[in-house]
Image (cartoon, rainbow, N blue to C red):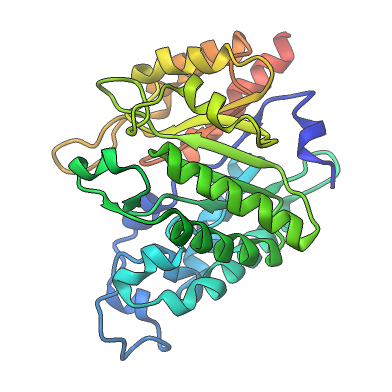
Amino acid sequence: MLDIREYLKNRLLILDGAMGTMIQRLGLEESAFRGERFNNHEFLLKGNYDLLSLTSPQVISNIHEAYLKAGADIITTNTFNSTNISMAQYKMENLVDELNFESAKLAKKIASKYSSDKKPRWVAGSIGPTNKACSTSLEKMGFEKIEPTQLYEAYKEQVKALMRGRVDIILVETIFDLSSAKMALRAIYDCFDEMKKDLPVMVSATISETTGNIYSGETIKELFEEIRSFPILSIGINCSFGARRAIRSLNELGELSNIHTSAHLNAGLPNNLGVYDETPEMMKEVFQSFIQNKTLNIIGGCCGTTEEHVRMFVELVESDSITS
């Protein structure tokens, strides 16, 4: 398969959309999360979306396939919360290796089905944050303090399993704490050394609507300056509060000319019913300007986005390539 680093020299790539809100739309009950295997588990499992890769794998396969059919170049594994720290709330820390390995295999199988020499498809191993942070400044926001070494070991366990499952990319997403992000990156590159294999690494942060900075206080530029010693493939913004409100921060990204940039954003903010109602047409104008100005190299969706949003991204990219 063509290395994604070479492919990015020639065109903009499309990342998939949301996983969690796509699952929410299905209205799954507790039984779908338990399956037969965890029928007698002592804790409620509804809401443990990562577990569906084991108990209802067809649900996850269908979502991957919907994004690939829409034209996504990169799909992300269903492993956003698959660390022993996040799985502790369900008393499932012992499943971390299996969750990551099987989720990676599942995504890779579907991606391979749609991949071709003309349009290769890649799988990005999704590594999300936990509900804990290394920075003491975030304790006032309700984040429990965690020791850096504990976070480092948790990420190493996750990365090794994703790599054994043959992901093509590692995606560290929804970064809100600089110190925690550094631990994740250190764990990733140490895994590369130990496993004697190098993968492209994407880094993506979430930003505050009020400040435009990540929640530990740094701007996107400052985040990049702090992590630039790592040979990352791209830096970007994800989740947050929709495309239009992120314009200033996305313009900051465009000024980081020596590295690829990405954006996969929410479909606005949830309304009173908890629904993200920013349609593909509502996001289109903003992303069209960034594509035309060559601000971004990778675009996609986060919470509330669907295959229809991805289809819109593909149309924008294809239209731009025709007029360029």
Residue at 51% across, 52% down: 127
Q: How many marks?
A: 0
- Image x and y of residue 213, in percent: 36, 24
> Which residue is nearer to you in this view: 136 or 303?
136
Q: Is residue 35 above or below residue 3?
A: below
Q: Is residue 54 visible?
A: yes
Question: Which quadrant holds the C terminus?
Answer: top right
What residue do we see at 76% from left, 62% from top? 195
Vertical position of residue 168 compared to residue 209: above or below: below
Residue 233: name its quadrant.
Answer: top right
Q: Quadrant of residue 38?
A: bottom left
Relative placement, left or right, of 43 versus 106 is: left
* Lateral position of residue 291 relative to residue 120, left or right: left
* 177 w.r.t. 84: above or below: above
**In the image, farthest residue toward the left:** 272
Q: Nearer the viewer, residue 108 or 232?
A: 232
- Asked if residue 124 shows in the view, the reply is no
Give the side of residue 18 with respect to residue 188, left or right.
Answer: left
The spot of residue 148 in percent (x, y) is 44, 53
Q: Position of residue 157 (x, y in %)?
A: 56, 66
- Residue 4 position, x and y percent, is 76, 38
Say whether residue 299 is left or right of residue 120: left
Establish if 239 lies above or below 155.
Answer: above
Query: Residue shown at 57%/11% (left/top)?
Result: 255
Residue at 40 percent across and 22 percent down: it is 243
